[in-house]
Amino acid sequence: MLQNKNFEYAICGGFAIDLFLGYNSRKHGDIDILAYWKDRDEIILYMKSIGFDVYEMLGGGKVHRITDIGKQYKSKRNIFCCKADCELVQLSETQEDDIYFINFQHIGQSKLNFIEFLFNDKSDKHFLYARNHNVKRNLKDVILFNKNIPYLAPEICLLYKSTDTEREGYQQDYELAIRAMSSEQIEWLNNAISFMNPDGHKWLNDSIINKTK
């Protein structure tokens, strides 16, 4: 669906961990895609052209249906694209045009009728962590491949997951991925988590993540 397009992308989230491991480790709620802000409009137009409705998250349980790329809020870094038969989301109207309340159904995805894009920034040489641009990763290390499928490197996936370790599946993702990662990947993750959590973090106490110290 996304191959040979004029924008960079990579599978992220739990599916990226599975692509790194080489097997399906657990059930996943949806498909998450890493992309870059500079490609946002092109991605929206493309997804609409192949039959998806596109919504941007607004916060507070609300979303905006994007019918015109010239009219976007861009208040959050994620959009989701869904088809009419998608059972993962329930939308209810508000009193504002094209604004809806959203309720996600945590039933797991079985059809390719829902995709979420998470937008990030980069410099000429570095991927910039969305929550703090002082956390960087060399671009050559950011997107890996399982056969021809691009996926986000596990150390970056885990950095994002480190903000919500109690969420279903996140601890398992960490425990499986960390044991398959290189010492360099672990060291980068260790430094990034330490930088973002100066008062400590549960994963920093793990014996494996500390093996590079």
Image (cartoon, grey):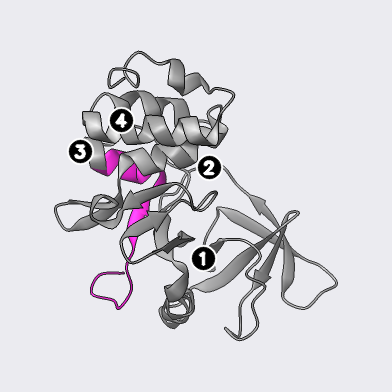
Q: Which three-letter amino acid code belongs to the residue tagged 4?
A: Ile
Q: Earlier in the sequence, mark 4 or mark 3?
A: 3
Q: Nearer the viewer, residue 138 or 117?
A: 138
Q: Which three-letter amino acid code belongs to the residue tagged 3?
A: Gly
Region in magenta:
1-19
Query: Looking at the rendering, in which quadrant would you find the N terminus?
Result: bottom left
Q: Which three-letter amino acid code belongs to the residue tagged 2?
A: Ile
Q: Nearer the viewer, residue 79 or 131?
A: 131
Q: Residue at x 57, y 83 (%)?
A: 69
Residue 8 appears in the figure: yes
Q: Does 6 sit above or below residue 106?
A: below
Q: Secondary structure at mark 3?
A: loop
Cβ–Cβ under 8 Å for marks 4 and 3: no
Q: Disc 2 vs disc 4: which is toward the camera?
A: 4
- Residue 22 image label: 3
Q: Earlier in the sequence, mark 2 or mark 3?
A: 3
- Residue 82 image label: 1
Q: Secondary structure at mark 1?
A: strand
Q: Is residue 103 left or right of residue 18?
A: right
Q: Which three-letter amino acid code belongs to the residue tagged 1?
A: Cys
Query: Looking at the rendering, in which quadrant would you find the C terminus?
Result: top left
| Distance (Cα) linking label 3 and label 1 | 27 Å
Residue 169 appears in the figure: no
Q: How many residues crowd mark 1 within 10 Å: few (<14), some (14–19), many (20+)?
A: many
Q: Residue at x 56, y 27 (%)?
A: 166
Q: Is residue 57 left or right of residue 204?
A: right
Q: Secondary structure at mark 4?
A: helix
| Distance (Cα) linking label 4 and label 3 | 19 Å
- Residue 188 image label: none
Q: Does 149 sit above or below residue 18?
A: below
